[in-house]
Image: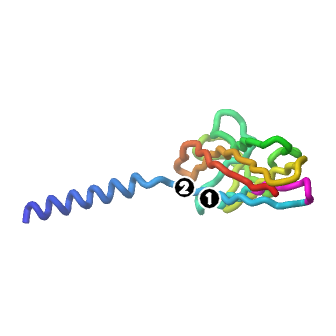
Amino acid sequence: MRKLLILLLIINLTAALNLNAQILNPIHWKFNVNKISQEEFELIFTAKIENGWHLYSQKLPSGGPIPTKFSFVFPNGIAFTGRVESKSQPKTELDPNFKIELSYYTDEVIFIQKIKKKKAGKAKVTGQVEYMTCDNHRCLPPTEQEFEFAVE
């Protein structure tokens, strides 16, 4: 009987430790291409944000979290047209974690990078988005999400 109780205690402790060790991932990314013309395309980054969490904007003051940042690897014949722009207006308010006024998104945000393709045929645009997310009590470390777009 005593061995059974010890075994049950070990199983319960192991289960509790495994629950605490789960990785939080409150931001879910989707990547799509919108063809505007034979030469012009939009790279679309959609971030679905879980309830209670927020994703920081691309423009933040120093002394707080890292801003959302997009890095690209373009093949020859592909060029930027402008900067990555947000289709949503971020909320701006005093952040309880950093005690400064910050801009962030909740629920969903769509970012768009316009590009021009100067050569015919298929091309692949790769890169990563680096971002930070918090709720009202904690922040997760900066995260990098790789992406890949097939531009045809």
Question: Quadrant of the image for the C terminus?
Answer: bottom right
Q: Please report the residue visible at 69 percent of the width from the left and 45 percent of the height from the top.
A: 127
In the image, is residue 7 part of the stretch drawn in magenta? no
- Residue 89 visible in the displayed image: no
Query: Rounded to the nearest whole Å, what is the CA distance between mark 2 and mark 1?
Result: 7 Å
Write the start and end of the magenta stretch as one range: 37-44
Residue 80 rendering spot, x and y as whole percentages? 85, 44
Kindly indicate the quadrant of the structure image that contains residue 83.
Answer: top right
Residue where numbered disc 1 is placed? 28
The secondary structure type at the circle numbered 1 is strand
Kindly indicate the quadrant of the structure image that contains residue 78.
Answer: top right
Please, what is the three-letter code of the amino acid marked with disc 2? Asn
| Residue sitting farthest toward the front | 121
Q: In the rendered view, would you say 127 is above or below 22?
A: above
Is most of the magenta stretch helix, strand or loop? strand
In this orientation, which residue lies closer to the viewer: 63 or 55? 55
Q: Which mark is residue 104?
A: none
In the image, is residue 41 part of the stretch drawn in magenta? yes
Residue 21 rendering spot, x and y as whole percentages? 40, 52
| Residue sitting farthest toward the left | 1
Question: Quadrant of the image for the N terminus?
Answer: bottom left
Q: Which mark is residue 25?
A: 2
99 displayed left or right of 84:
left
Q: Please report the residue visible at 60 percent of the width from the left and 41 percent of the height from the top.
A: 98
In this orientation, which residue lies closer to the viewer: 122 or 14? 122
Label 2: how many residues lie within 10 Å, few (<14), some (14-19) or many (20+)? few
The secondary structure type at the circle numbered 2 is loop
Residue 7 rendering spot, x and y as whole percentages? 17, 60
Q: Are marks 2 and 1 in contact (CB under 8 Å)?
A: yes
Residue 8 rendering spot, x and y as whole percentages? 19, 63
